[in-house]
Image (spheres, grey):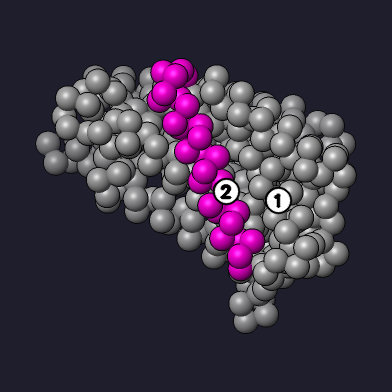
Amino acid sequence: MDRIDSNRRLRRVLFSQPVILFAFVIIIGVVTTTINPKFITWTNISSIISQSTSLGLVAAGITILIISGHFDISVGNMIGFTTCVMAILINKGVSSLVVSLLAVVLCVICSLLNGGMMILFRAPSFIVTLATSSLFYGAALIMTKGYMQTLYGKYRFLASYRLFGVIPFLFFVLFAGFLLVYLMIKHTRTGREIFAIGTNENAAYLSGINVKRSKLKFFAISGVLVGFACMVLLSRISGAQATTGMGMELQAIGAVVIGGSSITGGKGGVIGTLFGVILLSMISNAINMLHISAYYQDIVYALVILIALAINALRNVLIERQEG
């Protein structure tokens, strides 16, 4: 019996989404390096991780929402709005520390607005955040009048700082964000609430969970992560406009789905999301390294998501057959 249980656990690990995604990462790395050896250099690897930091932080927050059964498709335009506010204030002479704190506060307020209206109007989060997405985008356009807010080298400390002069600080930002979310999901009451509400909201309520307060908490946590993503992104690109961050919400949702989280809620994990983010960033980088037209990038993203869904479905069928 112990041997059978061990075999089942081994099969679950081998068929797990993170392991499958890790295999995809290795395959893409080997194929691209074979064609262009510069792909495997430390400089390029650092570039991939640095470019994926903002997306990774957003995706970590989206993971929490999706497991709990909700969406936030406004985060892309929320980033555009927040980075525009940050850039305007920095150019007016406001200190970087104050602007950074304001970014987090502003994103938390925007996220709480999403969660609060969802609860107040008893409306699906998808519809509410679809509306607020246009609200944030319009506000950014009004502030900037459609012009790019260039920082001329200001606010570069996050993107430029390297530990020991070699390791980009963004490495630690990305993995610290995922580590904190992982620990929260796995080892705190909030994590249990996320899965309970995502699995069955009524049952969660009957078990004593304050569902409304918990939902607001999930959106607030996502807002904190989006705020840090704004800091990282503005530091990297040294400028902002209304379209900054546009489309990132779809990439983040794609990374979460690729990572094995169920869009119906109640199932998922942040480790799979991390590999999903790295995989999407590697694909984008490989397209550039192989001199493939950038027009194909969205098509490749779509194919990867569909393949991941197919593999996830096949994996579940195989596991059910072997255990049943």
Location of mark 1 (residue): 85
Is residue 149 visible in the rendered structure shown here? Answer: yes
Image location of residue 6, percent across then percent down: 22, 42
Q: Residue furthest bottom?
A: 164
For the point 32% across and 37% down, the residue is 214
Q: How many numbered callouts?
A: 2
Q: Nearer the viewer, residue 185 or 145?
A: 145
Instruction: Confirm whether the magenta stretch covers residue 106.
Output: yes
Q: Secondary structure at mark 2?
A: helix
Res. 216 image quadrant: top left
Residue 153 - label: none
For the point 87% across and 36% down, the residue is 293
Give the amino acid type for the residue marked by disc 1 in the picture.
Answer: Val
Image location of residue 82, percent across then percent down: 66, 47
For the point 66% across and 30% down, the residue is 135
Instruction: Confirm whether the magenta stretch covers residue 232.
Output: no
Would you say 239 lies left or right of 78 here? right
Separation of residues labelled 1 and 2 (CA atoms): 9 Å
Image location of residue 40, percent across then percent down: 71, 59
Location of mark 2 (residue): 106
Q: Nearer the viewer, residue 172 or 134?
A: 134
Would you say 189 lies left or right of 297 here? left
Res. 70 image quadrant: top left
